[in-house]
Every structure is written in structure tokens, then in C-alpha cells.
Image (tube, coloured by chain):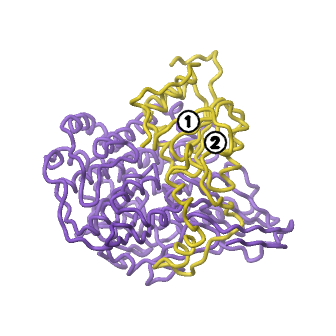
Chain colours: A purple, B yellow
Amino acid sequence: MDSLETAADREGLRRVVIDPVSRVEGHGKVTLLLDEEDHVREARLHIVEFRGFEVFIQGRPYWEVPVMVQRLCGICPVSHHLAASKAMDRVLGTRITRSAEKLRRLMHYGQILQSHALHFFHLSSPDLLFGFDSEVGKRNIVGVAAAHPEVARQGVLLRKFGQEVIRVTAGKRIHGTGSVPGGMNRHLAVEDRDALRADIDRMVEWSRAAVALVKRLHRADPALYDEFGRFPANLMSLVRPDGGMDLYHGALRFRDASGKVLIDQVPDQAYRSVIREQVKPWSYMKFPYLEQLGPEAGWYQVGPLARVQNCDFIPTPLAESERREFVDYGQGEPVRATLAYHWARMIEMLHAAEVIRDLLGDGDLLEGPLMGDGKRGNEGVGIIEAPRGTLIHHYQVGDDDLVTMCNLIVSTTHNNQAMNTAVREVARRYLDGRKLTEGLLNHIEVAIRAYDPCLSCATHALGKMPLVLELAAANGEVLDRVVRD
Amino acid sequence: MSDSILMPRVRVATTSLAGCFGCHMSFLDMDERLLDLAKVVEFDRSPLTDIKHCGPCDIGLIEGGVCNAENVHVLREFRRNCKTLVAVGACAINGGLPAQRNHLDLGDCLQQVYVKRDGVEDGGVPDDPELPLLLDRVHPIHEVVRVDYFIPGCPPSGDAIWTFLTDLIGGRTPRLSHPLLHFD
């Protein structure tokens, strides 16, 4: 599977770079090494930036963390806000109150709705509506607005609605403050609830229309949609105790590539008992894997494609009916095609709209205790299903309230090997032996975009790299090397 | 805003350096006004388009600070190509949260995260030549190039960005009223 990870012999190979990978969030680049006949010998997605969150969080008071860590990512700040809050609930030993949990859920499903809308309509729909090698200048949301105004308008307004759900629960659309260790700091105002209620039925309808749009695209070109970036992979996500989908809380479940459940109901606090992380020298993003299978076979996918197939059911009726249709499409096999991520994503968007609609009828959002009590400890893990997949925050806190250890495994990190595999699969199938054009190279980006890459999150890891100076000959041979560490 | 076919459209580029993309999200928080803006603006390089290197532009919006050699390169390309350069948000203006690493012993940090952290196998600090050289500090962009305007906030709101852009495009000196000026 990974034979394109490392070229056996780099000498004489031609380097092709896609930099930056565009219409994704954050910074990444793809390098390809080609031989004289344009055969692909190596293909890698590099995460090239890092920012140091895991280190500078250490030494800060624990109550600052849920607000600070949002700056990992502006697309899914709520996911970091809540994962950190959930971890700190554990540190405080708090049992979350009913009102606080429902308010957090409302905020989180607003996050899912806006991020999925952004991802599908603003970032990916140009490829799907115009074709992978359509005119570069047209492949963006403005081009979609010109050619399909109603699609673009619904996408923009779906995202807006999700952002408004966040604003009324967190105080701000981006980097708000609603959640705190142990609970929430505000109720939902009646007038905000009423404003959202006035629009929610339309959002459910538009989400259904979005699912229908993706299904139409699949039906129009099954050969492409079923085969592009298709490869077997294990799956991971949180599920409820009864196996239902839950994007806010649950326990870890892993399935193998044939769809068989490998491990189920691993408590969030015990994630370290099943997941390890590997480091490779060519990326700042680590490569996590299921320990019992090892790094070669134990990597897995997370995110919509994994979640929709890993759960036993979706606990809202419209999305559940769509899930069944999706699963049936696989005819007994898990659906494996990379572009099916978008289909699964729109099913989740519909689910989020349904959850929001139901929550808006709940009086606990408007009143009730916001903070619980508990017995203070020193360690906590918070796991949440972020839009892009499972997000793990792990902290240790000293008796002086300062954070002493922080480990983050963000969604895109879980998907690191899967994304690299998708890049290699597409490179092998569509690029190998051909003269590379912009349109062909965009095929690789289409595959990366399907994952909802959160490359900003993925660059959280570290601060400074030791200075390395290399003098290289034209053939790439290193003649001299100076290191300062 | 009027949609005139006689007026050349204003060309706008945007980029993200060491930031979280939140300022670009705020840009999208102009919501349906984005569709109005698209009538008078043409987008050049941006994370939202597939143009990888910007050409001559009227306005360049930059989020994020400068943390590696690639950021320096992109920033300079923007300055060369954009008549008006705008620093958007806390990271571009003062380095923002990523600048928290400026006071740390970062050699030690690398070891912590990539070698010593519980759960890490085959540890080692990534050192491939494809990874751009990191700077020892995160810098605000005005330390590298001349900046024409600064829009504060983490991030500035969609309303603030809308007001700023429509003023600038309309030939007025942009002024953000007090409620739109936030630093959080």
C-alpha cells in the first residue's frame, strides 16, 4: 500500500511540488518524485509548519486553556474549546449539569453544521460541480455563485446559521468563551432561541437538499465517485454505549477494513491503552495507529466517512434514513471511496440540523445550574468528534493549578496515514506515466480536500526547529551539513 | 455596492501565515454580503482559490505571523504585488498566541513533543529538507515588510472586515467605529 512513501533510489528523480495545497485550511505541501518516464516513485503530504501549542500551554493556569487552544484552528475552534473543557471537567472531577451539557451540545452541533457547510460548499464543491481540471480561475466559491447561485446561497446561509448558533452560546462566532472547566458560563437567551427557531426548519430542508445534491453527483459519474482514491482502511470514532452516533461524547470504537468491530467501548480516559503515535522525519504531523495492529497495519480513518459507518445508527430520523441508503450503497462492504467523505459529511450536516432543531425546544437551555461540583484530581482526557474526526486533548495539572503536560491528537493527525495513502493512490492511478498538468495535479488536492483537512490544527506541535544548513549538489547529494540544536 | 461592467474590478489577494485561519473564517462571516463583494472584487491568490502565487493586486489581506522561511517568502511576494497591504488580526499584528513560544527553550520543546512524550514510537525531530527552516521567534509582519493598515481582533469580526473593505474600495479612509474595534 505504501510503496510510494519512500523512493528506493532518489538519484535522477524529478521533483514536482504542490505548494501550497489550496482550498484547504492551513499549510501543507505535496511532493512527488518522478523518474525519466514520469512514473511516480514517491508521494508525500508534508505538514510544514508548527506553532508550539503543546508546549506553551504548559505552565498556564488550567482555566485559561479552553480559550487559548481555540487558536489552534479558526474553522473548528469550538471543538478545541469543548475538548479542553471536557478534559478539565475531569481534572475538577465535575459531573456536568444537564443545562451545561445541552448548551455545549448545541454549540458543538452548530460547529458541525457550519464547518461541514463551509467544507462542502466553499472549499470542495467547485471540484465536484465543474470538474477536477476545469478552469483554475473559476474553481472557487465565487465561480459556484456565478454558475449555481442557489447552491452557493444555501451553502453560505447554512454556514451562517451554524455560526449564529455558536455566537449565541459562546458570545462570539470565532474564539468565544461560553464553555469553562466544570460547565458553562451562560444560558441561551429566549430571543436568541426564538431567532434560531424561526430559521431551523429551512436549514433542515437545505441540508436534505445538500445530501440529494451529493447523491446526484455520485449517480452522474459512478465510475469516478466509486473508484477515485479507493483503498481499505480501519475506522475509528466515538460511539454511544448503544452504538449510536454521538458527536459530543462517547467511547472509542475501531472497525477493520472489512467492517468487523475490532475494539469497542474504550473509555475516553484510556485512549493511551490503544493508540500510539509514530514520528517520521518528513512531516511535523505524527502518525497514530492502533497499538494491537502495529504501525504498518494499525492506521485508521476518522471523520464523516468513518463515523457514518462505524456507528450502528444515527439517532435522528432523516439522517438515519440517509445513513441506511449510504450503507446499502456499499452492498455489504464498507463504502471506501474518498469522495464518499462528502456524502457522509452532508448526512452528518443533516443530523446536526435535526439535533439543533430538537435542542431548541429544550427548556434546560434557558435555565438550570451551569456548574457542577467535584473532587479535584490532576489529569484529564477530553475526546470529541470534531467536524474532521476524533479530537483528543490530554492534560495533567499540578496542585498549583498550572498545566504540567499537554498532548493533543487532532483529527487530521489521525487521518495522516490515510491522507498520504489517498495521495499515493491517486498519484498511482491518475498521474503515473503521464505528463503532469495543473488539472492532473488538482486530482491530488481533491483527495486531500475530501478529508476536511484541518492542517492548521495539525501544525500545533512545536516551536523551533534546530537550525540545519545543508550544502547539496545538483543531484541532491549532501556535501556539507551544519547543525545547531 | 453597484455592479458596474465599466469599472475594472478591484483585485484582492489573501493569505494565511502562522495563524489559525480564524481571520479567513471571519472574512467568510460577511455571509451573504460575500456574494455582493464578489461583484466588485476579483480574487487572486487566496486559500479559497486555486491561484498559488499572486499577481499584481490592489489589496492584500494577511493573517498570521511569521514563523518560518516560507512565511517570509510569501509575505515578501505579497508586498511586492499588492498596492495596499493589510495586517488582519492578532497574529499578523503582534504574533498572537503562537508568539508564546518566543520565550521558551525550543530545543528542549522539540525533544518533549517528538521524542519524550508518552505514546511516541520511533521518536526523532523531523528534519527533512522539504520542511522550511523555522525562525527562532514568531514575528509580526511589520517587522518584515511595510504594512499600510492593521485590523485588530482575534479575529476581527466579519462586520469589521466588511466595513474596512467597502470603505477602502469606495475610496474612503477606512474607519472602524468603537464597537467594531476589538482586540479579543
Query: What residue is disc 1 on?
Result: B150
Asked whether the beta carbons under mark 1 and mark 2 sit within 8 Å of each other, the answer is yes
* Residue A138 picture location, percent across and down: 60, 37
**Taking B174 as reference, is A177 left or right?**
left
Q: Which residue is drawn at 23% across and 37% down?
A: A197
Quick one: label 2, few (<14), some, or many (20+) residues within 10 Å? some
Quick one: label 1, few (<14), some, or many (20+) residues within 10 Å? some
Q: Residue B142 carries which label?
A: 2
For the residue marked with disc 2, what is the amino acid?
His
Question: Which quadrant does the C terminus of chain B fall into?
Answer: top left
Q: Please report, as a chain letter, where disc 1 is located.
A: B
* Residue A194 picture location, percent across and down: 20, 35
Query: Which of A169/B174 is in front?
Result: B174
Q: Is residue A161 visible?
A: yes
Q: Quadrant of residue A2?
A: bottom right
* Residue A58 picture location, percent across and down: 44, 66
Query: Which of A313/A187 is in front?
Result: A187
Q: Which residue is drawn at 36% across and 49% down?
A: A111
Q: Which mark is residue B177?
A: none
Q: Which of marks 1 and 2 is nearer the N terminus?
A: 2
Discs 1 and 2 lie in a common subunit: yes
For the residue marked with disc 1, what is the amino acid?
Phe
